[in-house]
Structures are given as structure tokens and as C-alpha cells.
Amino acid sequence: MPAGHDTATSPATQRLNNALREAGLAALISAGLSFPILALGAEPDINNQLALQTRWSWMFAAIIIIACARFFAVMLDGWRARTLAMAGLLCAAFGFGTWYFAGIAEPKIVGGTIVAGLIAMLAAFPIDTSESRASIAAKAPARPATILSSTATSLIATAGIGALIAFPLAMLWWFGSAGSLKWINNYGIQILIFVMLGWGLNIVVGLAGLLDLGYVAFYAVGAYAYALLATQFDLSFWICLPLAGIMAAFWGILLGFPVLRLRGDYLALVTLAFGEIIHLVLTNWSDLTNGEAGILSIPRVTFFGVPFTAGEGGFAHLFGLEFSPIHRTIFLFYLILALALITNFATLRLRRLPIGRAWEALREDEIACRSLGINTTNTKLTAFALGAMFGGFAGSFFAVRQGFINPNSFTFMESAWILAIVVLGGMGSQIGVALAAIVMVGGTEALRELDFLKQLFGQDFNPVQYRMLIFGLAMVVMMIWRPRGFVSTRTPSIFLKERKAVAADLVGEGYG
Amino acid sequence: MEFFFQQLINGVTLGSIYGLIAIGYTMVFGIIGMVNFAHGDIFMVSAFIALLLFLALTTVIGITWLVLAFIIVLLLAMFFTSLWSWVIERLAYRPLRGSFRLAPLISAIGMSIFLANFVQVVQGPRNKPIPPMFNETIALTSGGLFDVTVAWKQIVIMVVTVVLLTIFWYIVQKTPLGRAQRACEQDRKMAALLGIDVDLTISITFIMGAALAAVAGTLYLIQFGNVNFADGFIPGVKAFTAAVLGGIGSIPGAVIGGLLIGLIEVLWAAYVSSDYKNVAAFTILIVVLIFMPQGLLGKPEIEKV
């Protein structure tokens, strides 16, 4: 028995003291962080003079939330209890915020969310103790990697593709010709463009391990290639599509030759600079690109030469259908679906070739690669050029879909957005990238739809600002929590005797 | 000729600001080998902090003597910006030591996006103009085609830059803290074995970089008179270019690089094309990284396993 047991505080009290101290510290730091930038605001008045506004309530809300979060993080061990407590905290904060900031005084909603949040926070404590601490202390064995058998994988893939093929028809049947436009265009096509861009960038970042911050440059090259060829030389989309891809690949090689000898982060910055140069040239070279105004009236897509127009000789007339603009949208949907699937198919096949294995080896350890006689420059160059080519395809599709392009569609933010899709999806995982694109692009589109958010946060509430805020933070959290992305198991493309997946936490990575 | 001298003065002013930001890049890169992509946005945050503090001091507290207000704003902006940088380092970068190589860079990119959009959300997307200050000019020459002038704010910028650089140079070269930083730069493991608190030293490096970025942010605000949430990106990339041009890891190199980039940008805009002045800066970045990655004063890097 320890001698001084009357002076020693019990572990529970010690823990509480510790948690309170940590929470106090967190409150102090968050006060320092939020004081000028959150608590003070400046808006120009009528004379264009800035007038200071104070928003102490924002600052106190931030401090309280951060302090509570820190308190729970120290007090609770199990992830279930932590999640519950954080969810309860957010719920209560949301309920309080709707009442205090948005002025919504419906007692059922406000009181309900606050009480539910408080209950969740309190309930987290008994849950935490029931989760036996000993089992947490004993190091959990590495999660056994689950691997789907090849038949199951192909079954899922077939089902997914089948669902995608059926998607526009189902929408048409469900919402009718006018109502389905939004679903097919805003959700279907928009998401598939980013799935394709994500898969294209995945070759460069995920497979070859080259961080490309200027991917949107190749997207821009593809888009402008189609727009200029079509408006200046009257070439059809079907001729321009491969040309745009080739042109983007050519630019990829042009940039790649000198820069691919650089180490990882230098390469990232050179690609960033390249992307910005392309953007600036597109903005300023008005003779060629028409500058900020962009290129208007780009020829629309045709059904292999048959235009989607009303009347004689149009698609509807040829097939004996009633004319509807939805035909073109559905055709565009199938077009981008086909392009995306080609990207995926090419990537999956390339991974089985020596070049694909060289990419992955390069990502894991460049020095080892070089000592094994792999020509790293050529290997990187192929990855770069192929990624650029798919970016170019996606770009020319973008131009034909919009019918109008200007340089503002090709900024660094767009590159960062595609990179976020690849990073959050799990670098190298095809299905992960597709899921990330669906969640991120679809989520943004869905945010636009939510009218009640506008009622809560005011008419100038713009979800696009919040999406970048959230996904910027998500990139940081992802790197800390799961650097390999959500879908983080690896199936080596070469294996001895039987297929098996390797859990990401078991994969070491060489520097290079 | 007058035109050239006028541009020279403008270029040195701009270059001082780039040099101050570049030191943050170069010190962090020197000590942990990471490109702190969010540094440009730290600079933007500091300009916002300076703007808000300046408004608070002049309108709420009612300080009318601009020099005093400027000094208080400068010191407070350095403090609050350092706090931001310290928190970011603790939360977003420290857990990633020992992770794969691109992890800190991706995390920094995420942080950069977060900071820009956070400021956009809480401060609004519009440009924030402040009333001009230290605007009186001194004529250096007279009787020529036109007078070469230097504004008081340009003198303030140059003086503050020189004073702060001297202080920081002294800290890095002559104090135990600076010795610890240089030891960590050479070999972190060995420094830890010799009793240096490596984590603390790295944190202090981030804080020093952010403090200089805050000086740059305050000076930027005085020079250009307005700030916007997107203003961190382009100056950030240019300052990084300056750091690379001067030789990454070298503090005098960062200053020289900053001055060169400032001069090149201003002269390019004056004599060639102002539309393409950013293209010039980005081209320098590409050319330097490809052909002389060790920069003007840097050491050639040896790749180790």
C-alpha cells in the first residue's frame, strides 16, 4: 500500500483536474486566435470608409466549443464516447446558434436540439467507462485487411456501371423530361467530370507519387484546344477530342522533361507555377483566347454528326422522337461516363504492365528504383503525360458541355479541389477517388439546394465558401488520421501464390 | 533615368516585403525540410489582423498619433500571427513528422485553403481599404523630366525591414536559441541527443517566421492600402521564389532573393508588360528550381537514403 494515500488524489479527480486545466488552456489559446480576426469585423460604409464591428458572441461561441471539445478529448478514452460527445456538442451548439444568431425561436426545434446535445454529452461518460479501458490499453492488433474476391469485385463493378447506365433513364422516368435535367446535369455530369479528373490525377499523384498542383492547366489546354479548333477551323468534336488529349499530353511532356528530375516538393511548386502561368496567359493573351470574356458559342456536341436540334435532320427527327433538350444532356452523360470508364480501364490495365509497376515502385522508394535500373525520368514522364492526356479529354468535354469557357474555370482552387478528391479518396485507389468525387461534388450541389440553410444563415449564405473551408480542413485531418485515404487497403498488383491485401498501416514508405 | 530610379525605389520597397515573407519559408525549410505552403496565408491573416487592430486603435481607443498606432499594431500583429502559426504547427504539422514525404506538404496545402476561406467567411470577400498613411513624399532629385520621390511609407518599410533583419540575424547567429536552431538544421537526432528540445526549437522557428510575416503583412497594408482574403497566394508564391532564388535555408539569401524578385517584378512591369509581371515571377521560380536548385547562396543538397 502506498504510504501517503490520504494526500494523493484519486485518479478520477486527477483526470478531471487535468481535463479542466487543458480545457482552460485551450480556451485561452482560442481566445488569442479569435480575438482580432473573429471578434472584430470591418465593413466599408457608404463613404467607402471601413467601420469597425464587434462580434463578441462569435468569439465566445468559438471559445466555448473549443474548450468543451478539448475537455472531452482529455476525459474520454474510447472513440465511441468521444464521437458521441462531439456530436452532442455540435448538436447543442447548432440548436443554440439557430436561436441566438439566426433568431429562430421555435422552442421545439431549439430546445430539442439543445437537450438532445446535452444528453448525448452526458451519456458519453457512462459509455466511456463501460468500454473497458484495459482493452484500449492493450494494443489493438492491426486490422486484418479484408479483400474482396475477384468475382465479388467484378460483380460490384458491373452493378455500379449498370446503375450509372440506368441513372439518366431512371431520372427521366421519375422526374419527367424537365425535372430530370437538374439531376442528370448538376449531379450526374458534374460528378462524372470530377471522377474523371480525379482518376486522371490519380495516375500522377496516386500511382507515381508525383504531387501535381497544376493539373488544371492540362484541363485548360484540353478545353481551349477544343474551343479554338472548333470555332476557328470548324472541326467537329470527334476530331477535336483526341487532338485535345494529344495536345495536353504534349504540354505534359514539355513541362515534364526538365522538371521531373526535381524532388517531390520542388516538383509540386513547379507544377503550381506552370498552372498559374497557363492561367495568366489565357487571361492576358486576348488575341488568341479573348481574355477574361472567354470563348463564346462553342459548337455543341452532335450525335456522331447528327445535331441535337429541333426540326428536319435533328436527332429527335431522325429517331422519330419528340424534340427535347434533355436528349443532348443524356448523350453528354453517356459520353462523360464512357470517357471516365476509359480512364479507369486504361489505368487498371496499365497497372499490370511493367510501367505501372514501375510507377508504384517509384512512389514507394525512388532511390531503390534507380538502383534497380528503372529509368525514373521516363517512368515519371509517362505518368505525367498520361495524366495530362486524360485531363485534356475532360477539358474538351467540359468545353463542349458548357458551350462557353473563360480562364476563371481554371484557377489554382480548381487544382486544389481535384487534389483534395484524390487525397481524400485514398491516393492510388480508383474506387476511393470515385467515392470522394461523389461525396464532395454531390455534397456541394446538395448544399446549394438546401433552402433552409439560407433561412438559418441569411440570404448571402454561400455554401461554396464553406465547402473549401471544410475540405481544406479535411485534407489536414486526413493526413494526420489516415494518410492513405478512406479506402486505404492496398492490393499489390503482383503477388505470390494468393491475392491478399495489405492494410495501409502496415505499409512503410521509403523517402524519395 | 529618373523613371528608372523611381522604379528602383519601388522595387526595393516591394522586395523588402517579399524578403520578410521569404525568411519564414527559408527557416522552416532549413529546419524540417518542408515547404510551408500556408505561410503566404499566414501573411494574409496578419494583414487582416493589422487592419482590424489599426481600426480598433484609431476609432475605438482614439490614438491619433500614427507612429504610435503603427508601432502598437506591428507588435500586436506579430504576437497574434505567431499564435496562429504556433497552433497550426502543433495541430497540422507536428503529428506528421515521420509520415511519408508529401504528407506535410498536402497538410500545408489544406491549411492554406482553410485559412483563405476562413478569412473569406468571417471577414467577407470584398477588398478592405484603409485610409492612406505616411503618404507625404520627399523629392530626391529635381529639375529632370520629373522628380524622383520617396514616400514616407517606403522609408518606413525599408527602415523596419533593416531593423528587424538585424535583430533576427543576431538571434540566429549569436544566441543559444539560434545555435539550437542551426544544430537542428544540421542533424535533428544528434541535437536531441545533446539535450536540445527539438520540438520547441521547431515551434520557435515557426513563430519567428510568422512574426516576420506579420511585419510584412503590416507593411503591405500600409504600402498598398487594402487587403483581400485571396492576397496570400500570389505574394506567398513570389516569396517562396525569392527563398529558392537566394538559396533555400539561407537567411541572407532570402533577403537578397526578395529584393531581386521585387526589382524584377517592378522593372518588368515598367519596361515590358504589366499584365505579365506575375508570369515573370513564376518563370523565375521554374527556371531557378530546374537549373540551379541550390540558389545563389545555398548549399548543394546531397540526397541521402
Image (cartoon, rainbow, N blue to C red):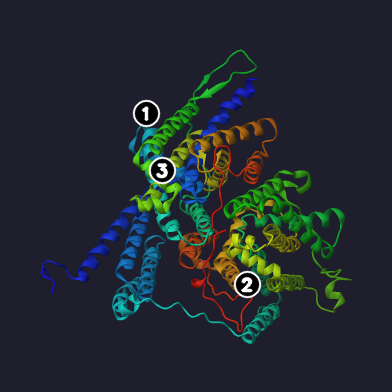
Q: Quadrant of residue A501?
A: bottom right
Which of the chains bears the disc numbered 2? A
Residue B279 located left or right of residue B204: right
Q: Is residue A171 above or below residue A296?
A: below
Q: Is residue A55 visible?
A: no
Amino acid at pointer 2: Gln
Q: Residue at x 49, y 72 (%)?
A: A506
In this orientation, which residue lies closer to the viewer: A166 or A371? A371
In this orientation, which residue lies closer to the viewer: B93 or B275? B93
Q: Residue at x 49, y 71 (%)?
A: A505
The residue that disc 1 covers is: B65
**Residue A154 in the image, given as x and y percentages of width and height:** 66, 83
Callouts 1 and 2 in the same chain: no
Q: Which quarter of the figure is the C terminus of chain B placed in?
A: bottom right
Q: Which quarter of the figure is the N terminus of chain B placed in?
A: top right
Q: How far apart in space, not on screen, are marks 1 and 2 (Cα)?
A: 62 Å
Q: Is residue A237 above or below residue B232?
A: below
Which of the chains bears the disc numbered 1? B
Q: Is residue A158 above or below residue A362?
A: below
Residue B208 numbered mark, or none? 3
Q: How far apart in space, not on screen, are marks 3 and 2 (Cα)?
A: 42 Å
Is the residue marked by circle 2 packed among few (<14), some (14-19), or many (20+) residues within 10 Å?
A: many
Secondary element type, mark 2: helix
The residue that disc 2 covers is: A430
